[in-house]
Image (spheres, rainbow, N blue to C red):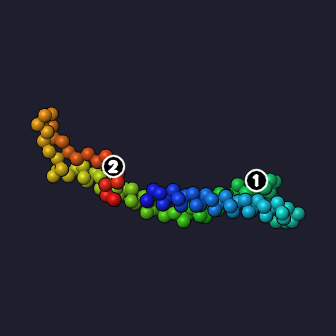
Amino acid sequence: MNLIFAAQIIQIFFFCAVFSVASRSFVASHRSSEYLFEGIESEGLYSLGIFFSFWGILIRYIPFDVIFQTETGKIIYSKFMEWDLSMTHYDKNTNELVSCRVQSMQLPE
């Protein structure tokens, strides 16, 4: 799941970079049309704004709620494993009740 998430973030970053470079070249080639770019002083700031505009649009491509629900489910599931009484035992050497200890969140997978 994390590799897919990282690949999607890289893909969105790549698309935003390509779109902002294309937008910068469009602005540079059509700079003579004053009515199109009235409030723009520099093409660089304009393309940075375009980058973040496309980032805001394309970030919806990644379903964050699914990632959040999966990670939250792993945490809750691991706590239920730690609280399970059938996974506890009495240690005679230390005279303590030892319970299960989850050391990896990858157990449900």
Is residue 92 found left or right of 16 in the rendered image?
A: left
Q: Residue at 40%, 60% (x, y): give it.
A: 69
Disc 2 element: loop
Count the marks: 2
In the displayed structure, would residue 29 be above or below residue 44? below
CA distance for labels 1 and 2: 45 Å
Question: Foreground: 93 or 72?
Answer: 93
Residue 96's disc is: none
Q: Residue at 20%, 45% (x, y): give it.
A: 99
The residue under label 1 is which amino acid type?
Answer: Gly
| Whole-percent x, y for residue 17 in the image | 67, 58
Is residue 93 found left or right of 107 in the rendered image?
A: left
Disc 1 element: helix
Residue 44's disc is: 1
| Whole-percent x, y for residue 9 in the image | 55, 58
Inspect this view and state whether residue 76 appears.
no
Residue at mark 2:
104
N-terminal label among 1 and 2: 1
* Disc number lying in front (1 or 2): 2
| Whole-percent x, y for residue 58 in the image | 59, 64
In the displayed structure, would residue 103 be above or below residue 20? above
Inspect this view and state whether residue 105 appears.
yes
The residue under label 2 is which amino acid type?
Answer: Ser
Residue lying furthest left in this view? Answer: 92
* Picture quadrant where residue 101 is located: top left
Q: Quadrant of the C terminus?
A: bottom left
* Picture quadrant where residue 30 is located: bottom right
Residue lying furthest right in this view? Answer: 32
| Whole-percent x, y for residue 40 in the image | 80, 57
Is residue 77 found left or right of 93 in the rendered image?
A: right
Q: Residue at 70%, 54% (x, y): give it.
A: 48
